[in-house]
Image (spheres, grey):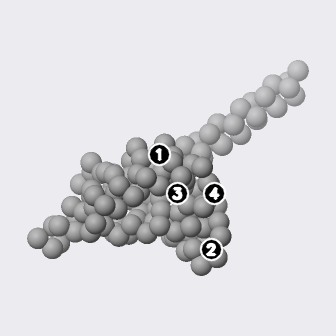
Amino acid sequence: MDKIIKIIIGLFVIVAIASLAVVLVQGTTEKAATPSGATVVNESTVYFFYGEECPHCKNVEPFIDNLTKKYPDVDIRRLEVWHNQTNQQIYSTVNAGAGISSPSGVPEVVIGKIVLVGEVEIPAKLEAYVQAIEKKKQSVNP
């Protein structure tokens, strides 16, 4: 019976450590800045990575198009990564720079160390970051 209790406690400790690691990793994807925070996004380029046939990407593209029109001074780069090897290399490099060694897929937006993924998160959060970039540009070039 003692052996079973030790195994259960050991498994509990492993699960607790793994859960803590997941929480810590998720908390670092947006560590560079928050839209409401005092610091502005480190980078001024918005990378939008997508796949040509990706249905989730198709749902995000009109939102990206709207942002591009609404904020023409912000550098928003659209990069198709399913069929373009050069863009795949940029995708890997930009993700590595953001601290992401295994990107989770497209649609994905990367701004410096900020990574937004999916058709829910991108529309929910991206415009605030774009506004922060525009605000920073305006303060540098009044």
What residue is disc 2 on?
A: 84
Residue occupying the point 17% across, 72% down: 140
Q: Amino acid at mark 1?
A: Glu
Q: Secondary structure at mark 4?
A: loop
Residue 103 as seen in the image, left or right of residue 137 = right
Q: How far is the residue under mark 1 from the one under mark 2?
A: 25 Å
Category of crowding for the residue at label 3, using alpha-carbon neighbours closer than 10 angstroms: few (below 14), some (14–19), many (at least 20)? many
Q: Viewer-nearest of labels 2 and 4?
A: 4
Quadrant in the picture for residue 100: bottom right
Identify whether 118 is placed above or below 101. above
Q: How far is the residue under mark 1 from the one under mark 4?
A: 20 Å
CB atoms at circles 1 and 4 under 8 Å apart?
A: no
Q: How far is the residue under mark 3 from the one under mark 2?
A: 16 Å
Image quarter (top left, top right, bottom left or bottom right) of the N terminus: top right
Task: Looking at the image, tell me whether mark 3 or mark 1 is earlier in sequence order.
Answer: 3
Task: Looking at the image, tell me whether mark 1 or mark 2 is earlier in sequence order.
Answer: 2
Q: Amino acid at mark 4?
A: Glu
Category of crowding for the residue at label 2, using alpha-carbon neighbours closer than 10 angstroms: few (below 14), some (14–19), many (at least 20)? few
What residue is disc 1 on?
A: 121
Q: Viewer-nearest of labels 3 and 2?
A: 2
Q: Any mark on residue 108, and which?
A: 3
Q: Viewer-nearest of labels 1 and 4?
A: 4
Q: Secondary structure at mark 3?
A: strand
Image quarter (top left, top right, bottom left or bottom right) of the C terminus: bottom left
Q: How far is the residue under mark 3 from the one under mark 1?
A: 9 Å
Residue occupying the point 53% across, 63% down: 49
